[in-house]
Amino acid sequence: MSGQLKTSSEDVKRTLDIPTIGLFSLVTLSALIGVPLFGYVYGYTKLDWTMAGILYLLSGLGITVGYHRMISHGSFRCPDWVKVAFLVAGSWAMENSALKWSANHVRHHTRVDQEDDPYNARRGFWYSHCGWLFTKRAHRIERYTHWLLADTVVMWQHRWYVPLLLSGLVLPFLVGFFYNGWMGGLGCFMLAGVGRIFLVLNSTFCINSVCHLWGSQPYSRSNSSRDSWWVSLITLGEGYHNYHHTFPRDYRNGPLWYNVDPSKWLIYTLSKLGLAEGLVRCDAGRRVGIGPRNSMSDGFGDIAG
């Protein structure tokens, strides 16, 4: 990736994205004030905590396995009904449609640490963590993820993203309501809906911020990506980011047997059940100071042009 790439004027001129700022502020204030306040006054049931944990895992895997490894990088293939399940779960994380998410993510890989990098860590922790969301920037779908425009499942989820997102909030309310009436519904909505979304968002944001500022670089020092085992604990395996930037098409982010990467374990299990195929696996032996034995290119060199 050349450091001489120029930025477009549409990306340099940034204006505030008021709707996104408003939505993010609402979720953040509700999670930091409303969720604990409701818990203090009314308390949460075991069902609320269980639903929060289940939906955290489902929406998190929807992002890590669905949006990230399957859609953005093509690390494996699966039947359409399995793809639908992952993209519905990914919608519940409130991180936009898979089409727009992938456009930003592929752009990040192609322009990492440059001005065109959507969440450029060189602009500081808070910018790469969440500040990048607050300015309008083109997703550049046609340039970075043009092949997804022909994917009927991806385009279906893109068109129905808002209803799918809302279903992830309605579901915990209904579960709580049928268990314990209106207050039960509100409690489950607050904890397993709003609180869970806030946690999933910020765990994902840690990949863009923490994993480009702190951690080890055992595979490559060509960019700011870093491995962080503790980030992998909260992101279901996404914290081995230096490896991922070195071998982005690998279905594993943590290639070693002891790496905590539930997402790779799920993909591998699906392959054994006949529900996933074409798993891309790269050489985990490449480290700084050790030449590649059978490495793969990042697959993005022909996209940006």
Image (cartoon, rainbow, N blue to C red):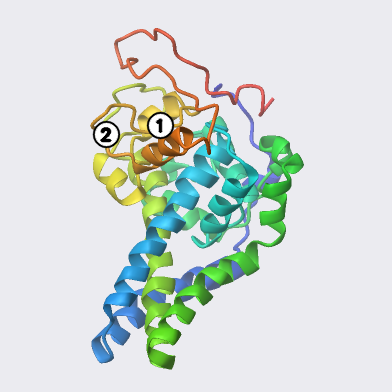
- Which residue is at 34% across, 21% downward? 219
Residue 105 falls left or right of residue 205: right
Report the residue at 40% width, 32% height from top: 252
Location of mark 2 (residue): 259
Taking the image as drawn, is residue 235 in sight?
Answer: yes
Location of the N terminus by quadrant is: top right
Task: Work out whether 259 lies above or below 60.
Answer: above
The reply to whether discs 2 and 1 touch (Cβ–Cβ < 8 Å) is: yes
User: Who is closer to the viewer here, 132 or 109?
Assistant: 109
Say what amino acid the circle numbered 2 marks.
Asn
Amino acid at dot 1? Arg
Residue 225 at least partly seen? no
Report the side of 228 relative to 201 (left or right).
left
Query: Counting residues from the N terminus, which is met first, the one under dot 2 or under dot 1?
Result: 1
Q: Is residue 280 above or below residue 65?
A: above
Q: How many marks?
A: 2
Q: What residue lies at 64% left-to-right and 69% top-to-bottom?
A: 163
Residue position for label 1: 252
Mark 2 → mark 1, Cα distance in angstroms: 10 Å
- The correct choice, above or below, for 190 with respect to 259 in the image is below
Of residues 195 and 188, the one drawn nearer to the viewer in this rendering:
188
